[in-house]
Structure formats: C-alpha cells, structure tokens
Image (cartoon, helix red, strand yellow):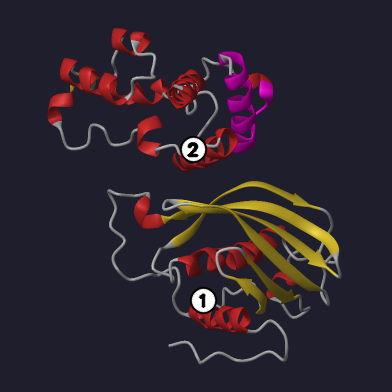
Amino acid sequence: MTQDEIFKRVKNQLVDALSVDEDEVTLQSRLQGDLNAESIDFLDIVFRLEREFGFKIDRNELFPESIFQGDPDFAQNGKVTAKGLATLKQSMPYADMAAFEANPVFENIGDLFTVDLIVRYIASKLAAKAA
Amino acid sequence: MRWIWIDRFVGFEPGKSATAVKCVSAAEDYFEDHYPGYPVMPAALILEGLAQTGGILIGEVNQFREKVVLAKIPSAKFHRDAVAGEQLTYHVEVVDLRPEGAIVRGTVTSNAELIAEAEIFFAHLDRNRSQQAFGSDNFVFSGELTYLLGQAKLAAARTDGPPQLPPAAE
C-alpha cells in the first residue's frame, strides 16, 4: 500500500471521527489544533484505524499520553528539556520533531499529533506485517 | 428525578445486541416546552434512550464492573419526529468492544418505520482517566438502572411471553 493510499484511508476515518470536511485533512493537519480533536476522539480514531486496517493498535504507542507526568526533569520554564526531547523522540518515533525541537514549548506538545504521524505509524506497521 | 428513557427490554443477546421499547406518553413533562403547540419528543432524549439500551448492553459484558459512560456520538440521523402515543423500539448492536470502550450502532423505529439512527461511543471511565480516581462504587449502574438491569437479564432469559418484573432495586 502506498503512502498516498494510506493517507486517503486515514483521511476517510478522520472525516467520520471528527466531522470535518475532506479538504480540511492534509498530512500537515494537527489533530487538535486544526481538526479540533478532543481527548475522547483519540480513542475513537484508534478504534476506527483498527477496523480500517485490520490490525491491533496500541493507543499508547500511537498517541502516547502522560509521557511527562511527574518528572520535573522533562520540562523547565515552560519548555521541554533536552532530556524531555530525547524521551519524546523515543516514545513518538513517528512524529516529525524538527519544528517542535526548534521551539519546544511544553504547551505545544499536542502539535506533534498530526495526520502525518498516523500515516507514518500505519505505514511502518504494515511494512512490519509484510516482512 | 427518574432518568430512565426506556420502559422495558424485549430482547437481549449478551455482547451482541439489545432491544428495548419506550412508550411515548402525552403526560411526559417535556411536551410542555418542546414545543408549545407542536409536541414532539426531543431528539436528545431519543438518543438517551438508545444510549441507555446500548450502555446496558456494554455494561453487561463485564457484569457491570466497568463504569460505562457515553463518550461521543460520532453520527446521528433523525428521519422524523416522535410523538405521544408511539412505541419506540430501540435496537443496538455492538460494532467494537475493547478494554477501553465500545462502539454500538443503533436504530429507533416505530411500527417498523425508521425514526432515527446513530453510532454511539462508550468509554470505560476508569481505563481512560488514569489520573483521576472515581472510586470503587459504580455510580453509572446504580439505583434506577439496576432495576433495568434486572429487566435486561429477564429479557435475555426469555424473549417471549408477558413482561416480568425483576426484584425491586435496592
């Protein structure tokens, strides 16, 4: 399955899950910032992707939550520390970290959850399955 | 306040589907305001009945140990109004059932005529709010709902014959 085919199928699921128009969903769209996803939508999206692609998705693998809970070493003065960034990279290998690293404001961690993140995750899982 | 928007279960297949009926009475309070001169059952309350039917179906799977809450209605369509004197039939089927929650699809019919259809997403509360403790008391399935649960179990045991009354709720 090509990246484009995966994107189209992911887009269809997001249109249903978030009640957005097809043309609102691009690879760069942020689930929360652009598509207004709320916390419960993430679970809905995981369920839909599982049905669409036919394999089990670990919610915490695709959308890790509470990575930083209770560890003051990960953020200081509203910014994610180097240690925090390393942890993020490890927890979210499918995220495009470049833009966030340039300005790692803690509050903007949600911006890492993009359509592209989902597509990359699905592509990697499909490749692993095929191997 | 009695927040029960189904009257009786008429079918119950554990983990798969449930059917309940609701008789719409002209005595119901909401007709006063919804709307003056044009009394129709509020669509939100039709959905509530469908969600109660589905919530009990999902709750029963884990013997009502999970706190099953209505998290989201991804889609709902209303085909016509429901009015006093009608018996609505709420039928729900499980689409997806996971440790974190479940999705059901349901229809609302009156004399086989489609009134509404919806997809309803339930979350298992304790598995989604790890930082919040809701305690061991299952406040979702308590009080009035326990009575309905008794009905659901009876409906599961026999789907024909006259209605039976479950033991009174504690």
Residue A57: x and y, percent?
A: 44, 37
Residue A29: x and y, percent?
A: 53, 19
Disc 1, disc 2: CB below 8 Å?
Answer: no
Residue A111 occupies quadrant? top left
Residue B23: x and y, percent?
A: 75, 77
Q: Is residue B158 left or right of residue A46?
A: right
Mark 1 → mark 2, Cα distance in angstroms: 30 Å
Front residue (pair B12, B114) = B12
Q: Is residue B41 left or right of residue B112?
A: left
**Residue type highlighted by circle 1:** Leu
Instruction: Determine whether B1 is above or below B46 in the image.
Output: below
Residue B123: x and y, percent?
A: 46, 53
Q: The disc numbered 2 marks a residue on which chain?
A: A
SS class of the residue under badge 1?
helix
**Residue type highlighted by circle 2:** Val
Q: The disc numbered 1 marks a residue on which chain?
A: B
- Counting the numbered discs, the total is 2
* Disc sitting over residue B88 in the figure: none
- The C terminus of chain B appears in which quarter of the rendering? bottom left
* Disc sitting over residue B145 in the figure: 1
Instruction: Based on the picture, tell me whether residue A19 belongs to the magenta stretch.
Output: yes
- The N terminus of chain B appears in which quarter of the rendering? bottom right
* Residues rendered magenta in the picture: A3-22
